[in-house]
Image: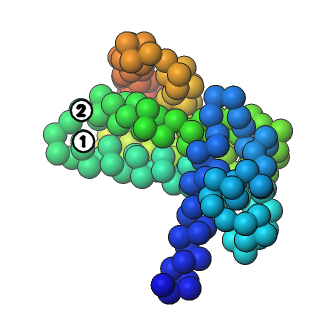
Amino acid sequence: MNRQLQKLRTRRSIIDAAFSLLDEQRSLSSVSLREVARVAGIAPTSFYRHFKDIDELGLTLVDEAGLALRQLMRQARLRIASGGGVISTSVDTFMEFISENSNVFRLLLREHTGTSLAFRAAVLREIQHFNVELTDYTKSTTGLPLFIANLQAEAMVKLVFSTGAEALDASPELKKNLAERLKLQLRFIANGAIKAAVN
């Protein structure tokens, strides 16, 4: 096998191993390099061929989680383009994402308020990317002024993150209720933004 391809596969194994170790009990700071290496099926010394230290791996995980969220948003837009309602489709896509990728979303939630300044800054950056994409989408589809579109995006992202935190370990019934409540709250925000732009 090509050496470069093998290196990429091993790096991917390390990232996947680290994500698999995160759950409702464990945060990034409690995961050790040796544990990650064991789950990835590599020698601990091999870890250093891919990452400088566990903190660099952590920052990579935050980047990956943010990218996954942005890809989710693009996926929702494709669904909307094929005939779904904007808010309803976005919320359904988001709820599917946190059900299938709970550790990815849990990482963003935890590190957003965690003890590591570098991780907090990285999560903030990812949320900002998310805000920018939603602002651009809102502005292009509604014609709202940039300032209002940005405020709407910020409010929506905060609300979605907050509801996602509640939904993470919720029963399917509660998740469904949270999703319906979120759709209604997002409509309040969207309608309020339109009214604010007119006044």
Write down the residue under mark 1. 80
Circle 2 residues within 10 Å: few <14, some 14–19, many ≥20 = few
Circle 1 residues within 10 Å: few <14, some 14–19, many ≥20 = some
Q: Up-down: is 110 above or below 186?
A: below
Write down the residue under mark 2. 85
Residue at 37 percent across and 12 percent down: it is 173
Residue at 50 percent across and 87 percent down: it is 2
Q: Is residue 162 left or right of residue 113?
A: left
Residue 67 spot, x, y in % from top left? 51, 54
Residue at 17 percent across and 45 percent down: it is 82
Q: Is residue 83 left or right of residue 163?
A: left
Which residue is at the front of the view, 167 or 51?
51
Which residue is at the front of the view, 126 or 106?
106
The first of marks 2 and 1 along the sequence is 1
Identify which amino acid the numbered label 1 is placed on. Answer: Ile
Residue 15 spot, x, y in % from top left? 61, 57
- Image quadrant in which the C terminus is located: top left
Asked whether the viewer can see residue 76, the reply is yes
Disc number for residue 132: none
Number of numbered tags placed on the structure image: 2
